[in-house]
Image (tube, coloured by chain):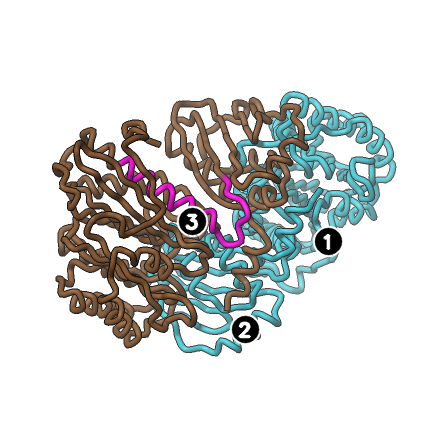
Chain colours: A brown, B cyan
Amino acid sequence: MADILGKKDFQVIKEGITYPQGIKAAGINCGIRLNKKDLALIYSEKVAEAAAMYTTNKFKAAPLIVTENNLVKSQGKLQAVVINSGIANACTGEKGLKDAWEMINYVSKGLKIKEEYVAVASTGKIGEFLPLKKIEAGLKEAVPMLSISGGTEAAEAILTTDTKKKEVAASFKLGEQQVKIGGMAKGSGMIHPNMATMLAFITSDVSISQGLLKYALQQVVEKTFNMISVDGDTSTNDMVIVMANGLAGNPTIEEKDENYYKFYQALYYVAEYLAKCIVKDGEGATKVIEVEVQNAVSFKEAKKVAKAVINSPLVKTAIFGKDPNWGRILAAVGYSGADIEPDKVDLYLKEKIIENGQPLEFSRQEVHKYLESSDEIKIIIDLKMGKDSATAWGCDLTYDYVKINTKYN
Amino acid sequence: MADILGKKDFQVIKEGITYPQGIKAAGINCGIRLNKKDLALIYSEKVAEAAAMYTTNKFKAAPLIVTENNLVKSQGKLQAVVINSGIANACTGEKGLKDAWEMINYVSKGLKIKEEYVAVASTGKIGEFLPLKKIEAGLKEAVPMLSISGGTEAAEAILTTDTKKKEVAASFKLGEQQVKIGGMAKGSGMIHPNMATMLAFITSDVSISQGLLKYALQQVVEKTFNMISVDGDTSTNDMVIVMANGLAGNPTIEEKDENYYKFYQALYYVAEYLAKCIVKDGEGATKVIEVEVQNAVSFKEAKKVAKAVINSPLVKTAIFGKDPNWGRILAAVGYSGADIEPDKVDLYLKEKIIENGQPLEFSRQEVHKYLESSDEIKIIIDLKMGKDSATAWGCDLTYDYVKINTKYN
């Protein structure tokens, strides 16, 4: 971390979405789910510049369509986000769209803000309708509970099969001003984002133009959320939203200057942290797998290789089995469709085990020990073709993944 | 089956590669593996027209490179194929190539045929070298054992984690002549062929030009072997070989006339049968899943949808769990990248359960019963966009898949 941001300037805080100035949140149970919080609200005292990215799945869920509409109408401004878990409001047609608008309406009335300043997100089962009465009542309860200590409750309320809440915050200096950034996310299964991702919400009190905020988000998502995979399935409801309300009081970032890159790095840190949390908490996962592809002819080619390896069920089961089965890794490199030359490929798994596409002598036992004792397994693939690199994160494939996705009723 | 081939004309026989005239085979244990046959030999009394398709994996194993070389040199003629299981001879560099040539040399000497008339295939562990002495001795044993009753032994010798041998044969009439065709295959894991496939060998006594034989093979493979998937992983060793020795005595097929299409249909039948056997015997599979995509704008778009659904771990686990989770199926349709309109999609799972992208009322219990009681689950997706269709075959994702691929040592 932090080429431009010095260590001195950059501090990581454990929690969360309400760390930036003027951000409040709440998380409650409104009755969609039995014994778990299921409704979260994020609120910025001041209207914030905002940007979002959405799933590329053609079955785009109603809340995404409605949020996209609002962001166009408000020209990239938001003041609140409402999120429910339990029901995804996807594949619900006209009624689903109406329901999403209703949720926005409740929030707008409750907070006395413009409808177009409200975003909505949903996660859970596809094809069911939202229980609007419960959500309406829930929001009446949640609005007065909004507070700077409500971040953790909100982070809990958006979870589905996740086993842990995912939140992080950081602060950094832009000249004299202390700027804060915070975020929360949910993931677990159906995770293979593409141009957008599972649910993630990031807030900051930085002052920045909407155009640059959107640009920064796109750049960061491409290298963080879009580089993780639990099972290769891209959901209908993936979305990332970022809000920046300017309350830090820094001179507004309006061009790609040093301050922009400092903010970019902080945003990158938060996004990468949350993305890794999602992978660590992947359904049934016992290990995080990091695949770094070096010296590709382009980022795109490097990404193809990294994604093929991270998605291979055979690589994932081998890691679960703690076996240094490099043959499966090379096979995935070979079918990735990327521009590679087999005779040039080097592979590192704890140590260099493949050189120029062929096995070196290595201690199987040593590597087995590494696979057994480490929670994070690092695979490095050197293509020796060019200068670009890409890193992808995934997890192993276990009995519990099958169990969770078989017996979820 | 059989638009042109009448039922009367077309007979299915259970076994196997030696059914056509002049084809002999043998299968033995030569000591690569402990208690399982591991060396197979197929021999045609007469030099046969031949064609092959190979994996698209860039780490193409040595036997494929050597076989491709030989088929170029012989201008598409073969008289024998030697196959070993246990070691794949992949990622083995120059030595691997030499070893593959050695195997060809042993066969050429043993059978007293030209080197260029011999093909070689290997399957098993990647990155290990072949025990040539054992193979040489094994071939000395196998050559005198070649017989028309050796097909089943050969079919057994090529298996790896397969639990069942896969073989089939058929006969059909071309005018006055009775023509025979037979085949055998191995599959199980790392099955997601692309332009070529796992190991499959098909023999016929039909008389056909090499050009048309190759063309027919390509067309058939595209719609059969290339439409199956166990885990989405494309192996380094996938190969299909077809040999036609002309001993049936039919007038040589030299253009796409009625006789060509009769042969094409028989070849299609054999390839589809073997492809389905591979899926049924997929690692840990309890059910075959057939996904038929109808009314796409092109075969290519239909194939994208069918492949996305058949490869989705979430769909595969839901089928294992006997849950009619249509949301996961629609999500896969949506992220397939294919040209679709969500609001037009109909989905059938036993009955029509989705119309125009939205759920109909259906009996969850009835569909659950269907998922529970059937070994073959059929999913039909009607895109209502065009006129082309594609069918893909896969299997469910089970605890045993994870087990087999974790504890394989």
Residue B159: x, y in percent?
72, 45
The residue that mark 2 highlights is: B368
Few, some or many residues within 10 Å of mark 1 (<14, 14–19, 20+): some
Quarter of the figure that contains the N terminus of chain B: bottom right
> What amino acid does circle 1 point to?
Lys
Does residue A53 lie above or below A84 as drawn? above
How far apart, in angstroms, are the residues tagged by discs 2 and 1? 28 Å
For the record, the magenta segment spans A264-289
Determine which of the numbered discs, if any, sits on residue B268 in the image.
Answer: none
How far apart, in angstroms, are the residues tagged by discs 1 and 3? 40 Å
The residue that mark 3 highlights is: A278
Few, some or many residues within 10 Å of mark 2 (<14, 14–19, 20+): some
Does residue B135 lie above or below A134 as drawn? above
Between A370 and B41, the residue placed more toward the observer is A370
Residue A36: x, y in percent?
41, 67
Residue pictured at 55% horizontal, 28% vertical: A348
Residue contact at pointers 2 and 1, CB within 8 angstroms: no
Residue pictured at 72% horizontal, 34% vertical: B79
Q: Could you tell me what secondary structure mostly forms the magenta stretch?
A: helix
Please tell me whether mark 1 sits on a helix, a strand or a loop.
loop
Residue contact at pointers 3 and 2, CB within 8 angstroms: no
